[in-house]
Image (spheres, rainbow, N blue to C red):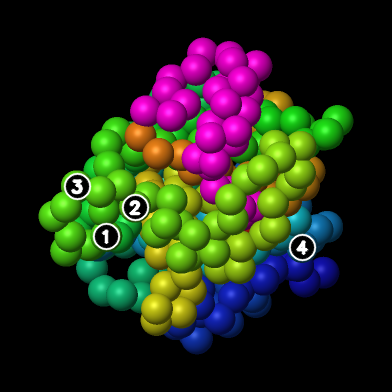
Amino acid sequence: MPRMLDVSDEVRSEIGDDEADRLLGGAHAPDSYECTSCRTPGDAFQEPTSTVLFVGEETAVLAFAHARCIPSQVVPVSEEQLAGAVRSISQSQGGPSAEAGPAHPQPQPPIPAPAPAPDAAGDPSAGRPGTPGQAAILGITCGLVLHGDTGHASLVVEPTGPVGRPGTITGEDEFLDLLQDAGFQPVTDLDKTPDQLPGWSVLVAMGKLHAVLQPSASGGSTGWWQAHQPLQVTDAWRFAANQLGEVTMYAVPAGTVGRQPREDLLRQALERAVTLGQVVAASLPLAGT
Protein backbone atom coordinates (compact mmCIF):
# COMPACT_ATOMS: atom_id res chain seq x y z
CA MET A 1 0.00 0.00 0.00
CA PRO A 2 1.51 3.40 -0.96
CA ARG A 3 1.97 6.12 1.61
CA MET A 4 -0.41 9.10 1.36
CA LEU A 5 2.44 11.62 1.29
CA ASP A 6 2.44 15.16 -0.07
CA VAL A 7 5.71 16.83 -1.08
CA SER A 8 5.03 20.43 -2.14
CA ASP A 9 6.88 22.10 -4.98
CA GLU A 10 8.83 24.30 -2.55
CA VAL A 11 9.93 21.29 -0.48
CA ARG A 12 10.89 19.47 -3.70
CA SER A 13 12.97 22.46 -4.84
CA GLU A 14 14.91 22.37 -1.56
CA ILE A 15 15.58 18.64 -1.31
CA GLY A 16 15.84 17.95 -5.04
CA ASP A 17 13.75 15.84 -7.41
CA ASP A 18 15.63 12.61 -6.69
CA GLU A 19 15.13 12.83 -2.92
CA ALA A 20 11.50 13.89 -3.33
CA ASP A 21 10.84 10.89 -5.56
CA ARG A 22 12.54 8.59 -3.06
CA LEU A 23 10.30 9.99 -0.31
CA LEU A 24 7.19 9.40 -2.38
CA GLY A 25 8.47 5.90 -3.12
CA GLY A 26 8.79 5.13 0.58
CA ALA A 27 12.47 5.80 1.28
CA HIS A 28 13.08 7.93 4.40
CA ALA A 29 9.31 8.32 4.89
CA PRO A 30 7.84 6.93 8.11
CA ASP A 31 4.97 4.47 8.37
CA SER A 32 3.82 6.26 11.52
CA TYR A 33 4.93 9.56 13.05
CA GLU A 34 4.12 12.22 15.61
CA CYS A 35 2.48 15.19 13.87
CA THR A 36 4.79 18.19 14.08
CA SER A 37 1.77 20.47 14.56
CA CYS A 38 -0.72 18.78 16.91
CA ARG A 39 1.73 16.22 18.43
CA THR A 40 -0.68 13.30 18.04
CA PRO A 41 0.14 10.06 16.18
CA GLY A 42 -0.20 9.89 12.42
CA ASP A 43 -0.18 7.03 9.95
CA ALA A 44 1.09 7.76 6.44
CA PHE A 45 -0.71 4.67 5.11
CA GLN A 46 -4.09 5.70 6.51
CA GLU A 47 -4.29 9.51 6.21
CA PRO A 48 -2.87 12.30 4.03
CA THR A 49 0.54 13.33 5.38
CA SER A 50 2.51 16.51 4.73
CA THR A 51 6.27 16.89 4.55
CA VAL A 52 7.42 20.06 6.34
CA LEU A 53 11.03 21.16 5.90
CA PHE A 54 12.42 23.39 8.67
CA VAL A 55 15.42 25.25 7.25
CA GLY A 56 18.09 27.18 9.13
CA GLU A 57 21.18 28.90 7.77
CA GLU A 58 23.21 25.69 7.47
CA THR A 59 20.93 22.94 8.70
CA ALA A 60 17.56 21.44 7.79
CA VAL A 61 15.14 19.02 9.44
CA LEU A 62 12.30 17.27 7.63
CA ALA A 63 9.18 16.71 9.73
CA PHE A 64 5.88 14.99 9.02
CA ALA A 65 2.39 16.20 9.85
CA HIS A 66 -1.28 15.48 9.28
CA ALA A 67 -2.27 17.25 6.06
CA ARG A 68 -5.32 18.59 7.92
CA CYS A 69 -3.03 20.32 10.42
CA ILE A 70 -0.35 21.84 8.20
CA PRO A 71 0.31 21.80 4.44
CA SER A 72 3.61 20.68 2.96
CA GLN A 73 5.92 23.68 2.98
CA VAL A 74 9.38 25.07 3.74
CA VAL A 75 9.58 26.93 7.06
CA PRO A 76 12.55 29.20 7.91
CA VAL A 77 13.67 28.89 11.55
CA SER A 78 16.73 29.97 13.48
CA GLU A 79 19.85 27.83 13.44
CA GLU A 80 19.73 27.74 17.24
CA GLN A 81 16.31 26.08 17.19
CA LEU A 82 17.50 23.46 14.71
CA ALA A 83 20.67 22.81 16.71
CA GLY A 84 18.53 22.12 19.78
CA ALA A 85 16.36 19.81 17.73
CA VAL A 86 19.36 17.82 16.53
CA ARG A 87 20.66 17.43 20.10
CA SER A 88 17.27 16.21 21.26
CA ILE A 89 17.05 13.72 18.40
CA SER A 90 20.47 12.30 19.26
CA GLN A 91 19.70 12.05 22.98
CA SER A 92 16.18 10.68 22.78
CA GLN A 93 16.32 8.50 19.66
CA GLY A 94 19.98 7.93 18.94
CA GLY A 95 19.11 9.01 15.42
CA PRO A 96 21.15 10.89 12.83
CA SER A 97 21.85 14.59 12.97
CA ALA A 98 20.46 17.03 10.47
CA GLU A 99 22.71 17.59 7.48
CA ALA A 100 24.83 20.74 7.51
CA GLY A 101 26.06 22.38 4.35
CA PRO A 102 24.48 22.61 0.91
CA ALA A 103 21.06 23.93 0.01
CA HIS A 104 19.60 20.47 -0.67
CA PRO A 105 19.81 18.61 2.67
CA GLN A 106 18.80 15.03 3.26
CA PRO A 107 15.50 14.52 5.14
CA GLN A 108 15.66 13.85 8.85
CA PRO A 109 13.36 12.63 11.67
CA PRO A 110 10.58 14.94 12.93
CA ILE A 111 11.77 18.01 14.81
CA PRO A 112 11.37 17.52 18.58
CA ALA A 113 10.11 20.16 20.98
CA PRO A 114 12.85 22.62 21.97
CA ALA A 115 13.51 23.73 25.54
CA PRO A 116 10.38 24.68 27.55
CA ALA A 117 8.99 28.19 27.15
CA PRO A 118 6.60 30.13 29.43
CA ASP A 119 2.90 29.26 29.39
CA ALA A 120 1.24 31.17 26.59
CA ALA A 121 -1.81 32.52 28.40
CA GLY A 122 -1.03 36.13 29.20
CA ASP A 123 2.73 35.69 28.84
CA PRO A 124 4.33 37.42 25.86
CA SER A 125 7.41 36.21 24.04
CA ALA A 126 9.63 38.85 22.48
CA GLY A 127 10.91 38.82 18.94
CA ARG A 128 12.00 41.32 16.32
CA PRO A 129 9.77 42.10 13.36
CA GLY A 130 11.09 40.96 10.03
CA THR A 131 11.06 44.35 8.32
CA PRO A 132 14.61 45.67 7.79
CA GLY A 133 15.42 48.71 9.89
CA GLN A 134 12.72 47.95 12.44
CA ALA A 135 14.22 48.37 15.92
CA ALA A 136 11.21 47.76 18.17
CA ILE A 137 10.72 44.51 20.06
CA LEU A 138 7.32 42.89 19.60
CA GLY A 139 5.52 41.23 22.50
CA ILE A 140 3.16 38.37 21.66
CA THR A 141 0.35 37.33 24.01
CA CYS A 142 -1.66 34.18 23.25
CA GLY A 143 -5.20 33.70 24.47
CA LEU A 144 -8.74 32.68 23.51
CA VAL A 145 -10.96 35.60 22.47
CA LEU A 146 -14.69 34.99 22.07
CA HIS A 147 -16.30 35.90 18.77
CA GLY A 148 -19.91 35.55 19.85
CA ASP A 149 -20.05 32.13 21.51
CA THR A 150 -16.97 30.72 19.79
CA GLY A 151 -13.50 30.93 21.30
CA HIS A 152 -10.86 31.86 18.71
CA ALA A 153 -7.17 31.20 19.19
CA SER A 154 -5.71 34.70 19.15
CA LEU A 155 -2.43 36.57 19.25
CA VAL A 156 -2.12 40.12 20.55
CA VAL A 157 0.97 41.84 19.14
CA GLU A 158 2.23 44.92 20.96
CA PRO A 159 5.62 46.60 20.44
CA THR A 160 7.68 47.90 23.34
CA GLY A 161 7.89 51.35 21.75
CA PRO A 162 6.96 53.37 18.66
CA VAL A 163 7.48 51.64 15.31
CA GLY A 164 8.27 53.92 12.38
CA ARG A 165 8.68 53.24 8.71
CA PRO A 166 12.16 52.09 7.68
CA GLY A 167 14.45 55.07 7.24
CA THR A 168 12.35 57.55 9.23
CA ILE A 169 13.74 59.21 12.37
CA THR A 170 10.76 61.30 13.51
CA GLY A 171 9.82 58.90 16.33
CA GLU A 172 6.21 58.85 15.13
CA ASP A 173 4.45 55.54 15.76
CA GLU A 174 3.21 54.10 12.45
CA PHE A 175 2.83 50.48 13.59
CA LEU A 176 -0.89 50.22 12.81
CA ASP A 177 -0.51 52.14 9.55
CA LEU A 178 2.20 49.71 8.42
CA LEU A 179 -0.03 46.74 9.18
CA GLN A 180 -3.01 48.34 7.43
CA ASP A 181 -0.77 48.80 4.39
CA ALA A 182 -0.22 45.02 4.55
CA GLY A 183 -3.98 44.31 4.66
CA PHE A 184 -4.91 44.29 8.35
CA GLN A 185 -8.23 45.99 9.09
CA PRO A 186 -9.37 48.28 11.95
CA VAL A 187 -11.46 46.49 14.58
CA THR A 188 -14.78 48.00 15.62
CA ASP A 189 -16.37 44.90 17.19
CA LEU A 190 -14.44 42.14 18.97
CA ASP A 191 -17.31 39.70 18.40
CA LYS A 192 -16.77 39.78 14.64
CA THR A 193 -14.16 37.51 13.06
CA PRO A 194 -11.85 39.50 10.76
CA ASP A 195 -11.27 38.43 7.17
CA GLN A 196 -8.38 36.12 6.31
CA LEU A 197 -5.25 37.81 5.03
CA PRO A 198 -3.79 36.00 2.00
CA GLY A 199 -0.16 34.96 2.24
CA TRP A 200 0.15 35.41 6.00
CA SER A 201 0.09 32.48 8.42
CA VAL A 202 0.88 31.39 11.97
CA LEU A 203 3.34 28.55 12.48
CA VAL A 204 2.62 26.19 15.37
CA ALA A 205 4.88 23.12 15.46
CA MET A 206 5.32 20.47 18.14
CA GLY A 207 2.68 22.21 20.25
CA LYS A 208 4.54 25.54 20.34
CA LEU A 209 4.23 28.89 18.61
CA HIS A 210 7.24 29.47 16.37
CA ALA A 211 6.48 32.39 14.07
CA VAL A 212 4.12 34.67 12.22
CA LEU A 213 4.90 34.41 8.51
CA GLN A 214 4.27 36.97 5.79
CA PRO A 215 4.43 36.70 1.98
CA SER A 216 7.91 36.81 0.49
CA ALA A 217 8.67 38.97 -2.53
CA SER A 218 10.36 35.95 -4.13
CA GLY A 219 7.38 33.69 -3.45
CA GLY A 220 6.48 31.52 -0.47
CA SER A 221 6.71 32.88 3.06
CA THR A 222 9.22 34.62 5.27
CA GLY A 223 9.29 35.40 8.97
CA TRP A 224 7.57 38.62 10.09
CA TRP A 225 7.92 37.70 13.76
CA GLN A 226 9.85 34.76 15.18
CA ALA A 227 10.08 33.68 18.80
CA HIS A 228 13.55 33.71 20.35
CA GLN A 229 12.42 30.42 21.89
CA PRO A 230 9.25 28.62 20.71
CA LEU A 231 6.36 29.59 22.95
CA GLN A 232 4.25 26.90 24.61
CA VAL A 233 0.54 27.30 23.90
CA THR A 234 -2.29 25.81 25.94
CA ASP A 235 -4.17 22.73 24.78
CA ALA A 236 -7.37 24.81 24.51
CA TRP A 237 -5.62 27.39 22.31
CA ARG A 238 -4.14 24.72 20.04
CA PHE A 239 -7.48 22.88 19.82
CA ALA A 240 -9.30 26.05 18.79
CA ALA A 241 -6.63 26.89 16.21
CA ASN A 242 -6.73 23.37 14.72
CA GLN A 243 -10.53 23.22 14.74
CA LEU A 244 -10.95 26.50 12.85
CA GLY A 245 -7.72 26.25 10.87
CA GLU A 246 -6.83 29.84 11.67
CA VAL A 247 -5.59 32.25 14.32
CA THR A 248 -6.83 35.81 14.89
CA MET A 249 -3.98 38.29 15.13
CA TYR A 250 -4.69 41.60 16.86
CA ALA A 251 -2.15 44.41 16.81
CA VAL A 252 -2.09 47.45 19.09
CA PRO A 253 0.32 50.36 19.67
CA ALA A 254 2.88 50.29 22.48
CA GLY A 255 1.39 50.69 25.96
CA THR A 256 -2.19 49.88 24.90
CA VAL A 257 -2.93 46.40 26.28
CA GLY A 258 0.12 45.37 28.32
CA ARG A 259 0.82 42.06 30.02
CA GLN A 260 -2.50 40.56 31.11
CA PRO A 261 -2.43 37.44 33.33
CA ARG A 262 -5.94 36.19 32.42
CA GLU A 263 -7.98 35.95 29.24
CA ASP A 264 -10.91 37.94 30.68
CA LEU A 265 -8.54 40.80 31.49
CA LEU A 266 -6.99 40.51 28.05
CA ARG A 267 -10.41 40.91 26.45
CA GLN A 268 -11.25 43.90 28.63
CA ALA A 269 -8.00 45.59 27.61
CA LEU A 270 -8.73 44.85 23.94
CA GLU A 271 -12.25 46.26 24.25
CA ARG A 272 -10.86 49.50 25.70
CA ALA A 273 -8.38 49.70 22.83
CA VAL A 274 -11.16 49.09 20.29
CA THR A 275 -13.19 52.02 21.64
CA LEU A 276 -10.10 54.20 21.10
CA GLY A 277 -9.65 52.95 17.54
CA GLN A 278 -6.29 51.41 18.38
CA VAL A 279 -6.70 47.81 17.17
CA VAL A 280 -6.20 46.24 13.74
CA ALA A 281 -6.66 42.55 13.06
CA ALA A 282 -6.76 39.75 10.51
CA SER A 283 -7.44 36.02 10.51
CA LEU A 284 -4.27 34.13 9.60
CA PRO A 285 -4.35 30.52 8.39
CA LEU A 286 -2.71 28.05 10.73
CA ALA A 287 0.73 27.30 9.24
CA GLY A 288 -0.55 28.15 5.77
CA THR A 289 1.38 29.78 2.94
Pointer 4 or 2: first along the chain: 4
Residue 8, image x, y percentages: 59, 75
Q: CA distance from mark 4 to mark 3?
A: 50 Å
Element type at mark 2: loop
Q: CA distance from mark 4 to mark 1?
A: 43 Å
Q: Which residues are magenta?
A: 255-284
Q: Identify the residue under disc 2.
A: 174
Check the picture and name the quadrant holding the C terminus. Answer: bottom right
Q: Amino acid at mark 2?
A: Glu
Answer above or below: position of 197 versus 102: above
Element type at mark 4: loop
Residue 131, image x, y percentages: 30, 60
Residue 2, located in which quarter of the rendered image?
bottom right
CB within 8 Å, label 4 to label 2: no
Q: Identify the residue under disc 1.
A: 165
Residue at 76 percent of width and 44 percent of height: 192
Nearer the observer, disc 4 or disc 1? 1
Residue 230, located in which quarter of the rendered image?
top left
Pointer 1 or 2: first along the chain: 1
Tell me if I can see residue 69 in this picture: no
The dot on residue 171 is 3
Q: Amino acid at mark 1?
A: Arg
Q: Which of 251/62 is in front?
A: 251
* Horizontal side, residue 163 vs residue 276: left or right: left
Check the picture and name the quadrant holding the N terminus. Answer: bottom right
Nearer the observer, disc 3 or disc 1? 3
